[in-house]
Amino acid sequence: MDAFGQYLVNGLMLGTIYAMVAVGFTLFFGVLDAIQFSHGDVLMVGAFAGLAASLGVAALGISSPWLQLVAVVVCAVVVTGLLGAAIAHFLILPLHRAPPLNTLLATLMLGSVLRECVRLFYPDGANSKPFPALLPTSFVKLGSFALRVDNIILLLTGLIVIVGLHLLITRTRLGLSIRAVAQDGETARLMGINFSAVVLLTFGLGSAIAALAGVMNGLYYNEINFNVGLLLGVIGFSAAILGGLGNVYGAILGGFLFAGLEVFGSAALPALVPDIPSAYKDVFAFAVVIILMGWKPTGLIAERASERV
Amino acid sequence: MKRLSKVMGLAALGWSLLAGSAFAKDVVKIAFIGPLTGGVSSIGLGGRNSADLAVRLRNADPKTKYQYQLVALDDECKPNVGVQVATQAASDNSIVAGVTNFCSAVAVASVDVYHRFNLPVVVWGAVLPDVTYSHDYKEVHRVNGTMINQSDVAAKFMTGLGYKKFVIIHDTTDYGNGHNKYFSQALTKDGGQILADIGVSADQQDFTTELTKIRDLKPQVVYFGGLTPIGVRIRTQMQKLGINAQFEGTSGIKSDAYIDGAGQAVAEGSLSFLEGAPTDKLPGGAYFLTQYTAQKYAEQPEAYGAFAFAATNLIIDAVEKDGPNRHKVRDTLNQTKNATTIIGKVTFDDHRQNIVPLVTKYVAQDGKWVIWEDSAYAKGQRKLKGL
């Protein structure tokens, strides 16, 4: 029970983070049919911006963890939102008419640039950095299982972000514009929607959600490094594809599914097959993703031609 | 420019004539091979200077029978270049022996060459066990320890403190697998019990599942064979999951980055082991450092300088005894037993590996790696976990 509870919380936690990354991929693909491969590294930049903010606030002598947390989240979200919009403005929109492969390559290279920049220019950036533990570290006892309060807060935050995104897309004017652009950019323009503004906002929004995921990742592990975005990016992308690229709910489903596979892989594989160490959990998870993709090439929640977001 | 080089040439000629006539001893050449350029060149240059220091000190001694000359070659820490310079040194008959290799990959690639050309060598820095244990080449010796010695010392130390129940986590690279293998062997021999042995990938982020299993096993020690980045993650996540076991690492986490990454409070009490010792703690360390400073080398001796110095001296001793004959020098080196050097006694086993382990134990204390014997833990002022 104790171990099972731990696996469950861990799976939900990973699933939330993966889903928040996958949502970005799917939003970008929705509005612009572009794959933004530096998304994981944008997340990492957000986490480092948050870390820098916490150090800055601590240097100012503000010791309240809640104020620090606000500073971390605001700084991460703003920096990354602007970065995401800038990437859309300077890299992806100009390449919009070029073959999609160009966008893919350009963003892939941008990811390396961001990663190396943090490694080289953030002070001592090549080494792992401790991320401050800003959330309460107390426990809630559920029978024999001790649930950490910070995990509950992180899970709730993830849930709020996902629900908030859902409401934004389905209930607001901005959401309506995003859906319109996703369906048909040309027609949306004819209807008086400012196409590039919507694209920039969507990229800012998706990147800001990734930054939140990065901060959550940092708070969960109390450690970040310049390489953290690489695997998170690949996993987020796989989750988005698995769920059905272009569909927000598919991305969320894909994120949780991938996390479940990973946790199952590392918990059950060594028990079932004695010679397989838990190092194979990613091999297992990605292999299952490949099989699922063969079964449902358009994703678990297939994109309907008329609606993309 | 041309004139300058001419003057320099004449000066060199004059100097060599003077030197030749002043000592009138036969010149014996010894090769030094190490990384003199590239990322680890600081260690290579420190090693070269230290070998050079051994040669200079001997040449200054009027009782020596030969005039020694060091031929320094750059292996760039690349196996292909290493094999080239090894061939160059080994095929030069005026070179009697070599002080060779810091990088393990280069050393492993070069041992065949030394064997084929009958060049006796003493390895001064490469730590991979295979350099001496993967073959039976009588030419290859090594003064520094390997991860086998490190694991032996680590296992003996931990069981000596009273720890019985261990869990091993290791990365699945050669480094992690090697540590897993040798530490498990040594630990079982010393009466420790291994509750679980978990292989993880070298860039893994999340260890919650593995650590949850470990928490149920209630070990006294979590042993980790791998490098700093995931060492930081495992230690931090142990804390998050409330695992109150002692964390024991290898040489792979003996870096300031480990303490910075995990944070001073979480890193406190972590153990690590490193082959060799700080130069000033070696038996002849003070003497070596004084002589080294007196020669005003541009670079520091670095961690392995003392080993290069000791290796060079062993070779010179053999030449003094047998004359500049590769076969005789090899046989004499083979039989080295309890030889006194600045790194302590040197005895070669049947694979010509120095078996007197020089491994230093470290504990993280107040944000620094402190030598165990000097720490508050050894003095009983602080306690390790899990006992």
Image (cartoon, coloured by chain):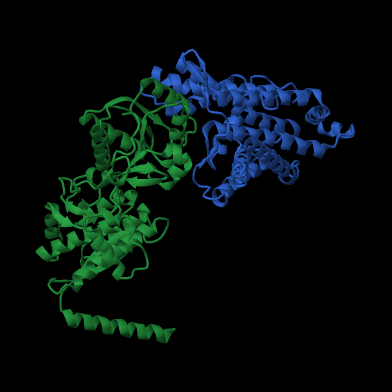
Chain colours: A blue, B green
The residue positioned 25% from the left and 28% from the top of the image is: B192
Question: Residue A210's quadrant in the figure?
Answer: top right
The residue positioned 50% from the left and 47% from the top of the image is: A126
Is B385 on the left-hand or right-hand side of A227? left
Q: Quadrant of the N terminus of chain B?
A: bottom left
In this rendering, is residue A168 above or below B248?
A: above
Whether residue A306 is visible to the viewer of this picture, yes or no, is no
Whether residue B184 is visible to the viewer of this picture, yes or no, is yes
In this rendering, is residue A138 above or below B289?
A: above
* Image label count: 0
The answer to which of B245 and A164 lies nearer the viewer is: B245
Is B56 on the left-hand or right-hand side of B255? left
Is B386 on the left-hand or right-hand side of A295? left
Q: Where residue B170 sits in the image (x, y, percent)? A: 37, 33
Q: Where residue B329 sits in the image (x, y, percent)? A: 14, 59
The residue positioned 72% from the left and 25% from the top of the image is: A164
Q: Where residue A222 sits in the image (x, y, percent)? A: 52, 35
Q: Where residue B207 sits in the image (x, y, percent)? A: 46, 29
Question: Residue B201's quadrant in the figure?
Answer: top left
Q: Residue furthest front?
A: B381
In this rendering, is residue A116 above or below A144?
A: below
Q: Quadrant of the C terminus of chain B?
A: top left
The answer to which of B331 and A67 lies nearer the viewer is: A67
Is A181 on the left-hand or right-hand side of A288? right
